[in-house]
Image (spheres, grey):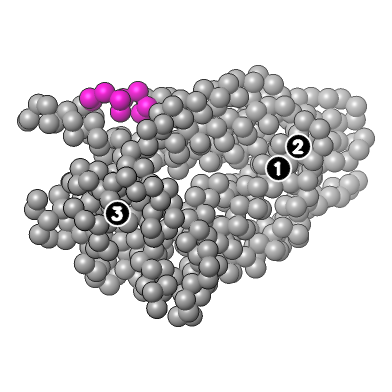
Amino acid sequence: MDGTGHRIAALTAREAGLVGCRHCTRVSPIGTQTCPRCGGSLESRDRTSMQRVWAWWIVGLMAYIPANLYPMLLTRTVGQVTDATIVGGVIELAHHGAYGVAAIVFFASVIIPVGKFIAIAYLAVIVRRPHGHKPSQLLHLYEVVEWIGRWSMIDVFVVAILAALVQFNLLATINPGVAAVCFALSVVFTMLAAISFDSRRIWDQIRRTSDESPA
Amino acid sequence: MTPSDDLVCCPVCDTLHEIHGVEEGKRLRCVRCNTVIAVDRPEAIVRIVVLATTSLVLMFIVIFFPFLELRNGVFDSRASVFETAMTFNRGVMAPLAIAVTLFVIVLPVTRLVSFVWALGPLSFDRPPLPGAAFALRLAETLRPWAMAEIFMIGVAVALVKLGDLATLAMGPAFWSFAAIVFITALQDTQLSKYSIWTALDTASQR
């Protein structure tokens, strides 16, 4: 072991027979259940991680489908009821000439969720077997997915604000549609899927492959 | 190997590092994944407590004062965050009411209170309160679920959507909310798990 300097080159806590705490960075002997410093639960590698990722991913997708099919917003003006789906709302914004805002909403409610489903599935499939990807790139992908997921909530909040403001009995009322609930659930489930993913796995497989074929 | 106080693992990739103090103002990054592990800013704790307290005060304004006002010759309406959360409190939409209340009010406030509880006494050189470790872990876990800043963008989008229906005016809560978003972003740059937990350790041994 070349632990002479300030760091020990790429030796993991697991390989050193230790378990690291992800909450407070302290290390304990392997087999310790709770961290002595912060009381968080310890696990060298989260064994149920992949099952949880896929479970949340699937329910997330199940909620995302009705979120796109049913109306998000029900507008009632002088007896007339119009409804708008997620994509319909974006098109309406673009018709008003608000292209910038339309782009933000489109990005937050279509591009991010769809991109997230693809990215999480890709990560979950690829870390299971030896792969030739640079781990730092995979980590970047994971961090982007984890960070950006919550921004999909924009549309749900917009619906909430509009419904709170526009309640003028006969003249005009705005109410949330079923899709608002489905979409909110979908965002929560995919966030949970991203959080369940154990980022330490990204490096483990790399180690194994480079051990097998020394380059 | 035996665990010691100098031995630290990267929370993202599990690489071990030996830390013998950090030079003032320097950041220590993981050799493998480049995650910031330790930041030495002695004033960071005080700064976090001050920022969290400020946000808490502003939060009161945000929750109960109107943040948007809708005016038109015929009708007039205003909404506070509290009212927004309460609009869905019936029928099928009840889950939405709960979600909005949690993400915009309950979780951000819980997170701020946890920070003040865990780190407040430290900034006055006092031993930490009971449950400080739990509070700190809670604040960290809640981080992705506190969505005040996303709500702000939602307000902006709503402004555009209603633009041609009526005149809109921003209430006092809107500006407080903008300030909170800015403060939270500032606060999160001060965070480093290793440094905060080490500070908490040192304080409880005193």
Q: CA distance from mark 2 to mark 1?
A: 6 Å
- The reply to whether the magenta stretch includes residue A63 is no
Chain ID, mark 2: B
Foreground residue among A29 and B189: A29
* Left or right of residue B32, residue B193 in this image: right
Query: Is label 3 in a helix, a strand or a loop?
Result: strand
Tags 2 and 3 on a common chain = no
Query: Is label 2 in a helix, a strand or a loop?
Result: helix
Residue A106 visible in the picture:
no
Tags 3 and 1 on a common chain = no
Disc 2 and disc 1 in contact, CB within 8 angstroms: yes
Task: Provide residue B190's location: percent of width, then percent of height.
Answer: 41, 63
Task: Provide residue B96's location: percent of width, then percent of height.
Answer: 70, 38
Q: Which residues are magenta?
A: A123-131
Q: Residue at x 35, y 70 (%)?
A: B41
Q: Residue at x 62, y 47 (%)?
A: B103
* Left or right of residue B32, residue A123 in this image: right
The amino acid pointed to by label 3 is: Val
Question: What number of labels is visible?
Answer: 3
Q: Which mark is residue B94?
A: 2
Residue that numbered label 3 is attached to? A27
Residue that numbered label 1 is attached to? B98
Q: CA distance from mark 2 to mark 3?
A: 44 Å
The amino acid pointed to by label 2 is: Ala
Q: CA distance from mark 3 to mark 1?
A: 38 Å
Chain ID, mark 1: B
